[in-house]
Image (cartoon, grey):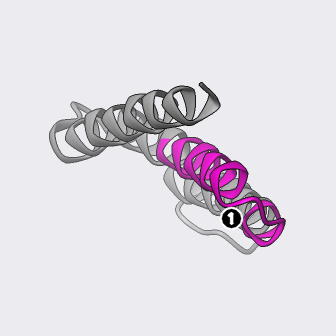
Amino acid sequence: MIAYALVFAMACFGLGLLMNLWLLVRGPGRADRVLALDTMVINVVALLILYGIRQGTGVYFEASMLIAMVGFVSTVAYCRFILRGDIIE
């Protein structure tokens, strides 16, 4: 039963990833594109965690933590670039 739930959850997060990709391409503004990128990072982290549960190994959990940290830092840096025009003062 858990296998069906994992497949369903992976399909839902994959669909969400595709919708965010569409928003990234067709977004009306830069802020919408930043939010789409941030949400895509969250969806990728969720997909990695679900895949780790399916495979029964802890490597994917560590990879998802690394991707989450890099995604947070890149979102903050991109927002600073949009607001100020530079990343490092």
Q: Nearer the viewer, residue 6 or 28?
A: 6
Q: Which residue is mark 1?
A: 67
Side (left or right) of 23 relative to 88: left
Side (left or right) of 8 relative to 49: left
Q: Nearer the viewer, residue 3 or 62?
A: 3
Please state the extent of the stretch shown in magenta in the rendering: 40-63
Residue 78 at x, y = what percent?
Answer: 56, 58
Q: Nearer the viewer, residue 50 or 16?
A: 50
Residue 18 at x, y = what percent?
Answer: 27, 41
Does the magenta segment cover residue 47?
yes
Q: Quadrant of the N terminus?
A: top right
Residue at the image position 15 percent from the left and 38 percent from the top: 26
Residue at the image position 55 percent from the left and 60 percent from the top: 81
Side (left or right) of 62 relative to 60: right
Residue 41 at x, y = what percent?
Answer: 56, 50
Majority secondary structure of magenta residues: helix
